[in-house]
Image (cartoon, rainbow, N blue to C red):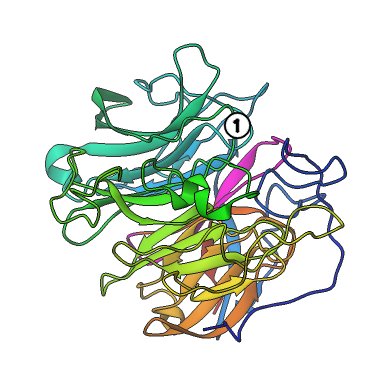
Amino acid sequence: MRNDLAIRSTSGAVFPARRRWLPATAALLFGIGVACAGAQTAPDPNTVYESGGHRFRLVTVADGLQNPWSIAFLPTGEVLVTERGFQGGGPAQLRVIRDGKLVDEPVQGLPPIRVGNQGGLLDVVPHPNFSENRLVYLSYSKPSADGATGTTAVIRGRFEGNALTNVEEIFEAQAWSKGMGHYGSRLAFDRDGYLFITIGDRQAPPSGNLEAHPAQDLSNHQGTVVRLHDDGRVPDDNPFVGRPNARPEIWSYGHRSPQGLAIDPDGNIWESEHGPQGGDELNLIQKGANYGWPVIGYGVNYGPERQPIHASTSRPGMQQPVRYWVPSIATSGLMVYTGDQFPNWKGNIFLGGMNGVQSMARLVMDGTRVVSEEKMLGTNLRVRDVRQSPDGGIWLALDDRGGAKTSIVRFERVD
């Protein structure tokens, strides 16, 4: 069913980069939407925002970070932050905020990482039983032996002191490509302890026979959400276990560039992904479901010609998004709020935005239905990740497309 809440705009957009498979005049933002020219690298601490009955300001927790990508809170009170890294600039690193301060030395023990464009060190989550096993999970862009190609991989290791020890790879996606985009890489544990991983389509061209696109092909991991045991084993009840020519790790498929993943208290799995020029999506992930990319969707090809990609916006057997955006907001980190600091927002879904249309979307929910949406924080901040802290606070990782150092900030209520 078509989403009546879609946002539409006729405003112009600037797309500063190009892909090989697009026309020479087609410009884009490496698959993540519109560039936010002149975006702030730090918020104004004197600005007071208001949304849904709460007033708040943004307070810097740590700054000087190289493209922070993800935030993870540990039971010890420490906070882990991944720095994606920037080609020709800062390296990919895992950092620690301890006693309210960013530790100067990065965490040791990471594997080689393929840094460039959207690649680098990406998501980080602690094991649900971190207090007992001290295990931390990290996703990253893994280089081939000669460095010519890369894929999405996940490692885990024990976080001790300022190092990862006993590091082991638990998943390597069959999604190798020379390209440097659409790695996916979001991680989330559900309440039963299963690990979900997103993998992007690796910018495979959406042209020709759309049904033959890698995101529609179960023999690889491109454009999928994967479900594993915490040690990387495949659960017996995954939907494609035992099917010939299908990867048993796959839980859902037909995704493009999944940038957000969160599981709510009811066990619903929420995923957000970038469309092309228009057509960003919020999806409710179902076992074995096909989400349609690139056969169906609401976006068009990059460039002023706005050439169509999809056969249609719907097809039997393919899932519709719960919400979609035209133009794209370049949705990134995704969170379902359950805290008490901002009681009016309980149950709301928060999504970061990175393209200058809006910096954050707050969706008011009724179960799995979107009741309304509110734009938050204006348009000047690129919000890469949004996370709830153990005390019910909200933290953001801010990103700069040009590689300038940025900040981790938190919401502070103004009563």
Q: Residue 97: x, y in percent? A: 42, 40
Q: How packed is label 1: few (under 14 Cα within 10 Å), some, or many (20 or more)?
A: many
Q: Residue 304: x, y in percent? A: 87, 57
Residue 309 position (above or below residue 132) = below
* Residue at the extreme front of the image, as rendered: 209
Q: Relative to 223, is 192 on the left or the right?
A: left
* In magenta segment, residue 394: yes
Name the one closer to the observer, 109 or 73.
Answer: 109
Query: Looking at the rendering, in which quadrant would you find the C terminus?
Result: bottom right
Q: SS for tag 1?
A: loop
Question: Where is mark 1, residue-wise?
Answer: 179
Name the one closer to the observer, 199 or 99.
Answer: 199
The magenta segment is 390-408
Q: Residue 38: x, y in percent? A: 82, 49
Question: What residue is shown at x 50% (from left), y 68% (from top)?
Answer: 282
* In magenta segment, residue 150: no
Name the one closer to the observer, 177 or 32.
Answer: 177
Residue 245 position (above or below residue 94) = below
Residue 278 position (above or below residue 25) = below
Q: Quadrant of residue 139?
A: top left
Circle 1: residue type = Gly
Question: What residue is shown at x 29% (from left), y 47% (from top)?
Answer: 74
Name the one closer to the observer, 213 or 142.
Answer: 213
Q: Residue 43: x, y in percent? A: 68, 55
Q: Quadrant of residue 166?
A: top left
Question: What residue is shown at x 37% (from left), y 21% (from top)?
Answer: 108
| Residue 394 visible, this angle | no
